[in-house]
Amino acid sequence: MSLKITTLIENTMGEHLALKNEHGISFYIEKDGHKLLFDTGQSGTFLENAEQLQIDLSDLEYVILSHGHYDHSGGLRSLISIADKFELILGEGFFNEKYGYKNGSYEFLGNNFNRKFLQEKSISYKFVNNDLNEILPGIYVITNFPRIHKDEVINTRFKLLKDGEFISDLFNDEVLIAVDTPEGLVILLGCSHPGMKNMMDAARNLLGKPIYAVLGGTHLVEANDGSLDISMDYLNKGEMKVIGVSHCTGQKAMSNLSISNDRYFHNRTGSSLIVG
């Protein structure tokens, strides 16, 4: 078994100064000869980084988008210019119109493409409905997360526009990727709007295995102090051997982890996790 996960783009620069960063995230996954992409950042910049890293994205088998926010799906249009044979995997509700609300003003936060665009470009896509979906041997897409941890509350500023009315966005479209390895599960998170702990517990329970590593966004940037303390305790006392959270995790949470947890690293543009 061999697994390599490379962060093609993230909010912050890494040591490779020829790479470019942006608010967003994109992971390139290589496992036993299979090639996948999880999220595409907010623009096509991740393609330039892939070229710098000598990563060929033209023959991807799958592209999975964690949820319908621009900073995770915005690069798909650019990707299609070099690759169009992959299957696109989405969570139910991915194409719902997503907005952010503040002081009477709504801002569109959703995708820059729709179903019609995918059909015109002959991109094969499907929605995952089941809790657990094995798309390749040992690679799972998970959704429908039980909302168990009551401290994980979605900010009410996130809205959906449905039938002419704004309603709360519960992020039922969000998915994660779990990769089974001899060391344990490797979990990839997009933004964790349904709750980092809810999502990780779902993966652990569905697959019946411990979590070896977690990478990606946890949305702790909006957690209140009480919830943040609970989440720090969850990560510090958990079985994870590698904790590479960033993106929407927030500076306070990342600073706390860098002090309290020697298994933490700031997963940034150009970082790679290699297992096996």
Image: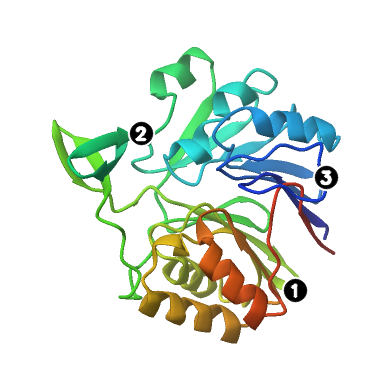
The residue where tag 2 is placed is 95
Quarter of the picture holding the C terminus? bottom right
What residue does disc 1 label?
A: 183
Q: Using the image, determine if residue 214 lies above or below residue 53.
A: below
The three-letter amino acid code for the residue at tag 1 is: Glu
Query: Can you say whether 124 is above or below 190 in the image?
Result: above
- Badge 2 element: loop
Q: Residue at x 48, y 73 (%)?
A: 201
Mark 3: amino acid: His
Q: Which residue shows up at 47% across the image and 52% down it?
A: 175
Question: Nearer the N terminus, badge 2 or badge 3?
Answer: 3
| Tag 3 secondary structure | loop
Q: Quadrant of the N terminus?
A: bottom right
Q: Residues within 10 Å of mark 1 (few under 14, many from 20)?
A: some
- What residue does disc 3 label? 16
Image point (58%, 38%), residue name: 41
Which of the pair 174/23 is nearer the observer?
Answer: 23
Q: Residues within 10 Å of mark 3 (few under 14, many from 20)?
A: few
The numbered mark, 1 or 2, whose residue comes first in the sequence reads: 2
Is 162 in front, or is 129?
162
Q: Earlier in the sequence, mark 1 or mark 3?
A: 3
217 with respect to 225 (left or right): right
Judged left or right of residue 159, residue 36 is right
Residue 145: % across, % down: 39, 63
Q: Position of residue 168 (x, y in %)?
A: 22, 50
Instruction: Give whichever of 269, 163 is nearer the camera.
Output: 269
Q: Residue pushed farthest bottom?
A: 237
Amino acid at the residue labelled 2 = Phe
249 or 255, nearer to the observer: 255
